[in-house]
């Protein structure tokens, strides 16, 4: 009589990796509501700075665009066409508004999606709540 095949053993390294991943999810799930409230407030402050047309990230990207005249002309043509839908902003801040709308918003949504994937992978409902905030 043939013996049934034995299930493959997981290596100690694999189980350590799995344990580490779940412990991070456990840590996130164990956060009290007050800590989550503080994290949400910090997140709101961070995005307030990043979304500002005159914030450090928008200024850095605007400086890079202005460093090349062809790049500036191309971006300003796109910015004028897109931003005319929302009214006519001042020409001086048109580039910063365009950068805020076309760089900061996708960055914000991309980071939230990445955090939601982390929450899913770790099985942490609390991390998912933070991702949705």
Image (cartoon, grey):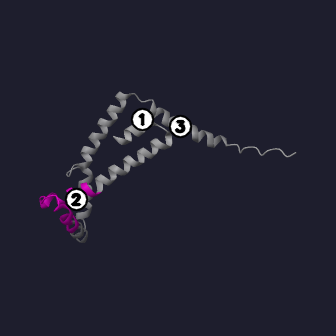
> For this view, does 47 lie left or right of residue 19?
left
Q: Disc 1 vs disc 2: which is toward the camera?
A: 1
- Locate residue 16, reporting x and y percent: 60, 39
Residue holding disc 1: 126
Q: Quadrant of the C terminus?
A: top left
How many C-alpha atoms fall within 10 Å of the one at disc 3: few (<14), some, or many (≥20)?
some
Q: Quadrant of the N terminus?
A: top right
Residue occupying the point 36% across, 42% down: 132
Residue lying farthest to the front in this orientation: 1
- Locate residue 54, reporting x and y percent: 19, 51
Q: Disc 1 vs disc 3: which is toward the camera?
A: 1
> What is the distance, in whole Å, between disc 1 and disc 2 at their CAs?
34 Å
Secondary structure category for the residue under label 3: helix
How many C-alpha atoms fall within 10 Å of the one at disc 1: few (<14), some, or many (≥20)?
many
Q: Which secondary structure class fits the magenta region best?
A: helix
Residue occupying the point 19% across, 66% down: 81
Residue 110's place in the image compared with 131, above or below, is below
Q: Is residue 92 magenta?
A: yes
Marks 1,2: beta carbons within 8 A? no
Front-lying residue, 52 or 118: 118
Residue occupying the point 33% across, 52% down: 107
Among the two numbered marks 1 and 2 on one chain, the one whose residue lies closer to the N terminus? 2
> What is the distance, in whole Å, between disc 2 and disc 3 at their CAs?
41 Å
Among the two numbered marks 1 and 3 on one chain, the one whose residue lies closer to the N terminus? 3
> What is the distance, in whole Å, between disc 1 and disc 3 at their CAs?
13 Å
The magenta stretch is 76-102
> For this view, does 115 lie left or right of residue 104?
right
Residue holding disc 2: 98
In the rendered structure, find residue 22 and report the number of the disc placed on it: 3
- Locate residue 38, reporting x and y percent: 32, 32
Marks 2,3: beta carbons within 8 A? no
């Amino acid at each position: 009589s043939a013996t049934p095949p034995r299930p493959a053993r997981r290596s100690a390294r694999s189980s350590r990796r799995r344990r580490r991943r779940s412990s991070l999810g456990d840590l996130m799930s164990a956060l009290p509501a007050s800590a989550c409230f503080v994290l949400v407030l910090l997140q709101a402050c961070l995005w307030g700075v990043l979304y500002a047309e005159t914030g450090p990230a928008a200024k850095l990207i605007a400086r890079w665009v202005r460093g090349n005249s062809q790049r500036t002309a191309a971006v300003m043509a796109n910015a004028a066409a897109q931003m005319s839908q929302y009214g006519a902003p001042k020409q001086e801040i048109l580039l910063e508004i365009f950068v805020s709308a076309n760089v900061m918003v996708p960055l914000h949504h991309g980071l939230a999606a990445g955090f939601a994937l982390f929450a899913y992978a770790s099985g942490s409902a609390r991390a998912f709540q933070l991702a949705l905030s």
